Structures are given as C-alpha cells and as structure tokens.
Image (spheres, rainbow, N blue to C red):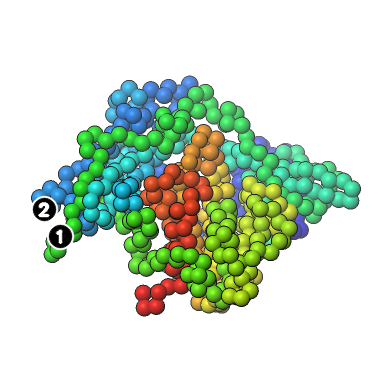
Amino acid sequence: MSSTIVYPNATTEPPKVRSICNFPPLSPKDALEERLLLESVSWPETPALPSPLSLELTSDPAHSSFTILPARGGGGQWHVGDQLEVSIAISDFKGQPKKSGGDFLLARLHNLTLGAGVAGKVVDHLNGSYSAVFPLLWEGAAQVEVTLVHPSEAITVLNRLTSEQPDRIFFKSVLSLGSRSQTTICNMCLRQTKEPICDFTDPRTGDPWFCYNPKNMSCDARIAHSMAGYKQTPALLKAKEDKLFQGRVNLKVCIPASGPAGVTVLPKKEGQPEVESSIVNFQASGYYYQGLWRALDGTKVRQFTGASAITQCLKGKVVHLYGDSTIRQWFEFLNAALPDLKEFNLGSSRTNGPFMALDYENKIMVTFRLHGPPLRFVGSIEEIRYIANELDDLIAGPNIVVVFGIWAHFGSFPIELYIRRLQRIRSAVVRLLDRAPKTVIIIRTANPKALLLDVAINNSDWFSVQFDKVLRAIFKGLNVHLIDAWEMVLAHHLPNSLHPQPPIIKNMMDVLFSYTCPQKGG
C-alpha cells in the first residue's frame, strides 16, 4: 500500500489529550449519526477519584443486594409471558448505600436443570439503586443472577484511559529495503514526536493507520504487521486504582439476594393480559430452553444436527467469513463438522489465515479473512484487508453468504474510531445489496468475556457493551441478520469467555444456518 510521509511541525505546542487520534471531518449525515450514537451510549456520570484512592467508599458487591419485587397483577403469582422485576441496591465497603449511579451490572434469569436462561435488562436510577427486568419464558423455577462487572469508580478509570491512553496497546511494522530492515511502532492513534510519520490511511475506506518512519527508509518498504505489546498496567493506573479491578472482590462478582433468589413460574393464563414491567419495555432477542436457543424475533431456529443436515443447507453456496478470532471459531466449527470440506493449505498461520476450504462434490466453499487493523496478530501486509474493501470487490448473489464480526480489537480506542469503521462497512453492505439484493448477510455482535485486571484495562465488557449498542444501531433497517452473541453468551450457564465454549458456538451456528436456509413458509 502506498503512503505519504507527514513531518510534524516542531514549533507547535504538544498535542492536547485525544489529539493523537485522527478524526477527519465527516459528512453532515455521518457526523449527525455519530453524535446521536455517542449520546445513545453515554454513561451516567461517575465519581472523580481521590488520590490516593480509598476502596472503602467504592461499590462493593458483598454489601449490595437484590430483591425480587412482588408479582404485579393477579394473585401475586408469576405466569409465563409476564415480566419479573428485581430491585438492586448498591452499597460501599462500609455498608453505606451509594447515592449515585454508573455501576456496570449484568443480569440473567436461569434454570440449570431445564437448560434455560435469558438475559435481563438493567436500568440505572442514578441514585445507587437499579432495576433488572426479565421476561418469564418457561414454566418452573427461575433463578435470578445479578453481577457487578465494574463499580462506578472503575468506569472513571476506564474513561480516563480511553481518553488519555488510546495507544496503550501498540503495534509494529517491519520495513525492508534490500538487505536492510527496521522495525517501527504503529497505531491508529500515534503520538507526535520529532520523527516523521508514515500515513497508511486506506485510500479507499479512509481507515487510519500510522507508523513512525525510520531514517533512510521509504514508507513503501513496509512488509509485515504485528502487535508490539501493552503499556504496563502499573504505568497506566494511579495509586491503588488496581484495587478497583480485583477478581472475587469487585470485578465481575455476583451480588447476593436479600430474600428469595428465584420464583416459580406458572403456565400462561389463557385470556389474561400479560403483566409487563412498569420500569422498562424490554424484549430479549431469544432464550435457551433444554440447552437450545429459541429466537424471539420471529426467526425459526432449526437444529442442524450432523454433517448431512449442514451440507444440505450449504450445498451450492459460498460462505465468506470476515473478522477476528471469534469469527475464526466459526470457520473452525465448519471444518470440524463437515468431513467432506477439505481445507486448502494456503501457507498461512493457524491464527491469522486467510483460510479456504472446499467440498467439491457439494459445491460448498468457505473462506475466512481477518479484518483490517487494529489487529493483535502477526501477518504480512498483503494478508490484512479491510472488510469494506472485501465487500466492494465481492461477486455477490443468492448463493453467497457474507458473515462478519468486528469488535474485540477495538477496546482500547475511542469509540468514534469504531463508529467510523462500521459506517464504512455499512456503506459497503448497502452497495453490495444494491447490486445483489439476494445475498445473505449475517453480522455477529460482541459478547461478554472473562475479566482479569489486564483484560479489563484494555478490553473490558464495558467497552464491548457500547460496541454492541452501536453495531445494532448502525445496521438497523438494512436487510441483514444479527447473531446476538451478547445475549447468547450472557444467558448461558457456561462462564463468559471471549471465545465461547462449543455448546454456545453450536447454537450460534444453528442460527447462522437458519438464516442461510430459512424454512419454507416460515
């Protein structure tokens, strides 16, 4: 890819915070959308932190509690179709009630024996109290689980890091000219120094990427990309701020119940109106029952059990997968599930791809390619391409299935960069559907994951939940299908994981096949 060299002006003042990220002007339409999206994901104000930090006055899940509210409507009983309301009270380590909001909570309702589970909706009342609302979708026992992912004080830290340290994960490229090669630091957000900068902004999409230009090297000599490392956590955090990210203390810890933690749900009452929540109108995208995902958006999710059922669905089709390692999981699933699907050896690494597999007899082809940077992988420049460009170059049609997911590598960057990436991909999707409207397009959302200190600092669920909301909004109204990985992971009894475990992947793939091969008349 050709590039330009940018020479910093040595007489200018040091860049202001956030100025290390390049935000070129948008069209009026895209700028308005970006502003509305930022408002939609804006978080309640969180407290300024004293220095040094005292943990005593911060949110403590052990001193907090949730209470199931009495059933509204007929006879104090819950029926299938009603909504369950739960009140959550957050207290600090002294046991004193918190007076402000901004804590990050997740909630689910489940029954392990029935293999049932559904995500709940949490509402912040901005005064230390919260509500969780759940649809009641199965008969029998239903247990409530409320998790404090982050106290509000930790959100203050994450906000500051995104603002002041968007380059806390950094990358490198190798530049090679004849017998000489040099390694240089690269990023979407690159701090100005006296070194000239190579501008590798994609000429077609406008996606930004910059590297420092080593002396006596041409920017055009770049041959490889990789992750260089993380800024060390102690250098990012102020005194005692690491105490806000302690497993089993205040990082993704369950909040105890005050009273019963579950209810018994009776059969649906015929002729009686369903009891809806007075707090929020919440519609889950689906739920698990007997370990199987049932969609609530009208999609009939079928079970594709065994290679023959999957092969019959994909016969005569080309499936293109684009994204990160959470999409690569789906390529690996297909490779393992279909013995007649033979992978070509393209000489690529098992981490990066690109990959291609073919079932010649059934005319099935499956490909996988990584999305463009930021990427925490090692690869040659030729292997790294932007999804929007791939879609623009694709010959599409009714037997083409396009699947993509992009989120997990953006956690350390300002959300504006993610919004702009999705806007460019959406434009490419619109162009693709204009020229080939029967192409099937499927998008994977973000999902919650296991969190340790270093993961939380760079890739917290708090970043992911914002990406999830933004992605849904940007692709709303288009002829595309969403696989709701967020709710499918949150509602399942297995632990949250960046790479969900096989039972969850199997359910995701059944949704994918159901979109690809919808039931006739259904």
Which residue: 50% across, 35% down?
Answer: 452
Residue 71 at least partly seen: yes
Which quadrant of the figure has residue 25?
Answer: bottom right
Q: Residues within 10 Å of mark 1 (few under 14, many from 20)?
A: some
In depth, the one of 16 and 407 nearer the eye is 407
Residue at the spot of label 1: 269
Quadrant location of the C terminus in the rendered image: bottom left
Task: State the image coordinates of residue 514 (x, y, percent, origin top left).
Answer: 44, 68
x and y, in percent, of residue 475 in the image = 47, 63
Q: How many marks?
A: 2
Q: Is residue 133 left or right of residue 388?
A: left
Between disc 1 and disc 2, the foreground one is 1
Residue identified by numbered label 2? 74
Residue at the spot x=28%, y=50% of the render? 134
Q: Where residue 412 appears, x then y in whole percent?
A: 56, 43
* Rendered view: 358 above or below 256: below
The answer to which of 485 and 97 lies nearer the viewer is: 485
Q: Residue at x 21, y 35 (%)?
A: 259
Quote the CA–CA distance across marks 1 and 2.
10 Å
Pointers 1 and 2 in contact (CB under 8 A)? yes
Which label's residue is closer to the chain start, 1 or 2?
2
Q: Secondary structure at mark 2?
A: helix
Could you tell me the amino acid type at mark 1?
A: Lys
Give the residue type that dot 2 points to. Gly
